[in-house]
């Protein structure tokens, strides 16, 4: 459909600003963890301009790659927000991947150095690949340092880096991956039972971390080493009993960051972080963009309901 990283960032920016003006609404996301490595979640968002209600249901299954399936997949239901008429049903895997990377990019463009050249990846799955592609579109990256599980995932990620003209470096530890990195992405499969193994003290001053996994792999006692922490949604976090980080350390959320303008403001003295668990407004932004683009290009399949 020809949707670029720049398109994705611009649409998320616009959706966040619309949300602050009361033009787009979203509910806190709901999630379940059965305890066997799977992660199930839903999001709900709506707008009257355009008239859309969007519900997403997604499953993260660590056993899917062995089945030859994506680790993240699900479905999106789109309805008219006035009448309830069904507008579209879409697979959620691609939208989830690019919206998560898009949210990270919205924060990175405002919190990371524009000349960032080294990317450190903790986690080597679908989200790592999505972030690699998106961040390579926006920053003059030269090297990608990779730490993750599964030789097949690591090899696939390294090949992708090479195809993008970047130098992949396979690391034996998370510390090796993030030390001296300008931008870090943490995308470990969510598990509240897993032992933390990433330390914010390893990051250099001025570096930026996009922490997509609710900070579960990060040592909580050292999160305060970040000089600035932005989260996805303050309201959603208030309603969640399990906080991602100490609320006293949080400066604001992504909407407030976007409201401050487009200019990057990295902290030269300490690393900074965008910590998130996922937000419905991102799904709304990218699902509505994909729907509009598909209609314009006459893609998809029309059915009578």
Image: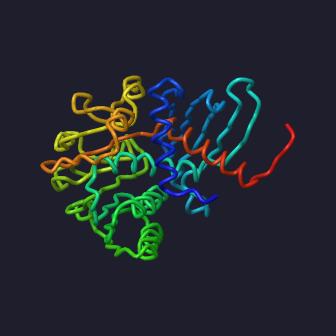
Q: Residue at x 31, y 73 (%)?
A: 169
**Snapshot colouring:** rainbow
> In the visual, does 202 lie left or right of 288?
left
Q: Foreground: 220 or 194?
A: 220
Q: Residue at x 18, y 55 (%)?
A: 202
Q: Foreground: 198 or 271?
A: 271
Q: Foreground: 14 or 155?
A: 14
Q: Foreground: 77 or 59?
A: 77
Q: Quadrant of the C terminus?
A: top right
Q: From the viewer's perspective, is residue 224 above or below residue 200?
A: above
Instruction: Say how many tags the image has.
Output: 0
Q: Position of residue 103 (x, y in %)?
A: 43, 45
Q: Quadrant of residue 167?
A: bottom left
Q: Is residue 37 visible?
A: no
Q: Residue at x 44, y 73 (%)?
A: 164
Q: Quadrant of residue 146?
A: bottom left
> In the visual, does 188 lie left or right of 284?
left
Q: Position of residue 254 (x, y in %)?
A: 37, 37
Q: Residue at x 25, y 31 (%)?
A: 246
Q: Is residue 95 visible?
A: yes
Kindly give the residue lying farthest to the left in the view shown: 269
Q: From the viewer's perspective, is residue 284 above or below residue 188?
A: above
Kindly give the residue lying farthest to the right in the view shown: 304
Q: Position of residue 198 (x, y in %)?
A: 26, 52
Q: Quadrant of the N terminus?
A: bottom right
> In the visual, does 164 lie left or right of 253?
right
Q: Position of residue 200 (x, y in %)?
A: 21, 49
């Amino acid at each position: 459909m020809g949707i670029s990283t720049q398109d994705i960032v611009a649409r998320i920016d616009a959706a966040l600003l619309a949300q602050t003006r009361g033009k787009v609404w979203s509910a806190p996301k709901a999630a379940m963890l059965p305890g066997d490595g799977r992660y199930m979640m839903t999001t709900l968002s709506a707008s009257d301009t355009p008239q859309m209600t969007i519900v997403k249901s997604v499953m993260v299954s660590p056993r899917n790659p062995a089945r030859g399936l994506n680790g993240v997949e699900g479905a999106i239901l789109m309805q008219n927000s006035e009448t309830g008429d069904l507008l579209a049903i879409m697979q959620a895997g691609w939208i989830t991947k690019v919206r998560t990377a898009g949210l990270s990019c919205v924060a990175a463009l405002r919190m990371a150095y524009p000349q960032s050249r080294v990317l450190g990846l903790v986690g080597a799955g679908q989200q790592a690949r999505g972030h690699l592609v998106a961040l390579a579109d926006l920053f003059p990256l030269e090297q990608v340092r990779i730490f993750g599980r599964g030789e097949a995932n690591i090899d696939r990620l390294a090949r992708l880096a090479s195809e993008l003209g970047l130098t992949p470096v396979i690391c034996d530890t998370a510390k090796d991956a993030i030390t001296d990195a300008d931008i870090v992405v943490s995308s470990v499969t969510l598990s509240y039972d897993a032992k933390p193994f990433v330390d914010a003290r390893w990051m250099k001053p001025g570096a930026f971390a996009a922490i997509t996994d609710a900070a579960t792999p990060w040592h909580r006692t050292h999160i305060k080493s970040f000089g600035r922490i932005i989260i996805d949604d303050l309201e959603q976090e208030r309603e969640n009993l399990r906080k991602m980080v100490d609320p006293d350390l949080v400066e604001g959320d992504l909407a407030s960051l976007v409201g401050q303008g487009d200019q990057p403001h990295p902290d030269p003295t300490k690393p900074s972080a965008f910590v998130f668990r996922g937000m419905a407004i991102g799904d709304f932004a990218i699902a509505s963009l994909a729907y509009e683009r598909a209609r314009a290009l006459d893609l998809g399949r029309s059915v009578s309901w």
